[in-house]
Image (cartoon, helix red, strand yellow):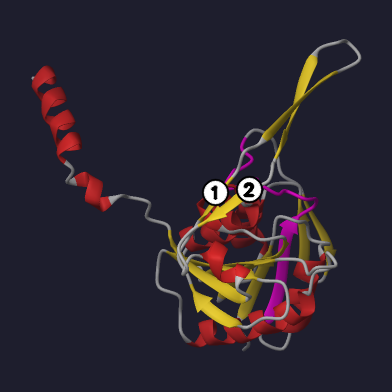
Amino acid sequence: MKPLIFLTNDDGFFAEGIEALSRNLKDLGRIYVVAPDRERSTASLSLTLRRPLRVKKIKTNTYAVDGTPADCVYIALKKLLPQKPSLLISGINKGPNLGQQDISYSGTVAAAIQGTFLQIPSIAVSLFPDKNHKYSYDSSAKIVNSIAMKLLENKIPEKMTLNINFPPPPIKGIKITKLGQKRYNPEIIEKKDPMQNSYYWIGPGNPKAEGAKNSDVMVVKEGYISITPLHTDLTNYKTIQHPTFKNIVVSITDELS
């Protein structure tokens, strides 16, 4: 039996990126789509806990959830999929998810991390537009198909999520990278409603990319596909042994005794 491949995203079940994945991966495995019923960008790992969630079956093996990307992964695993997936792919996102800042906010990356939490090999895929502001979804999905084929043969290590970003064409190759930085300076727009009460819009501003030559933000600038292994264990092990923290523990322990 072919492996089960679970597709999700944060752009909605109807998005071009997830439809391109469905088309191009159908020969590789049994495709199931469980995705938000609308755009849920920057939802990160948020879960819906204070209202019921509703699921609508769109067509065979395709479901829309009125919740976040992380909600979709939970509901799919617990209620909708016939078995545990062999691979979860989140995307293809309309726009990149690069650097420490993007991956912290991204619903696309969060869905893949949620899959990793649930012990499913998971990848997030995002895409830059070309100079004409068009997105090469199908050509990127074909490359994702090749990557997925290799990952089905060679499992991703536990607690590891792969974050993949496609540059604008032409593509020079593919590189394994580390996270860079995207320094945001958000614009806060203040306006008045009809009752003259203030309200605010948070705009992204123009982020500045920073990082080493082998960082994701720089590699895609050079025309390479970036694959960044993300680890779900965020513990800073070096800091555990840092004298400052040891002194804090000792001093508080003395106060408590």
Residue at x 71% of width, y 76% of height: 31
Task: Report if residue 38 lies within the magenta region.
Answer: yes
Circle number at residue 101 = 1
Image location (x, y in percent) of residue 75: 64, 55
Image location (x, y in percent) of residue 11: 76, 56
Image location (x, y in percent) of residue 247: 13, 31
Q: Say if 5 sits above or below 129 in the image.
A: below
Which contiguous range is marked in magenta?
Answer: 30-49
Q: Between residues 234 and 135, which one lies in front from this camera angle?
A: 135
Q: Give the side of residue 200 with respect to residue 224, left or right.
A: right
Q: Between residues 222 and 127, which one lies in front from this camera angle?
A: 222
Residue at x 77% of width, y 68% of height: 17
- In terms of sequence position, does the residue under pointer 1 or pointer 2 come before the other? 1
Q: Main secondary structure of the magenta part?
A: loop
Residue at x 18% of width, y 35% of height: 244
Q: Say if 43 sits above or below 195 in the image.
A: below
Q: Between residues 37 and 130, which one lies in front from this camera angle?
A: 130
Residue on which disc 2 sits: 207
Task: Report if residue 233 lies within the magenta region.
Answer: no
Q: Say if 171 sits above or below 180 in the image.
A: below
Image location (x, y in percent) of residue 100: 50, 52
Q: Amino acid at mark 2?
A: Pro
Q: Amino acid at mark 1?
A: Gln
Can you see residue 85?
A: no
> Real-space Cα distance between discs 1 and 2?
10 Å
Q: Between residues 184 and 250, which one lies in front from this camera angle?
A: 184
Residue at x 80% of width, y 71% of height: 19
Nearest-to-viewer mark from 1 and 2: 2
For the residues labelled 1 and 2, say whether their Cβ atoms are less than 8 Å apart. yes
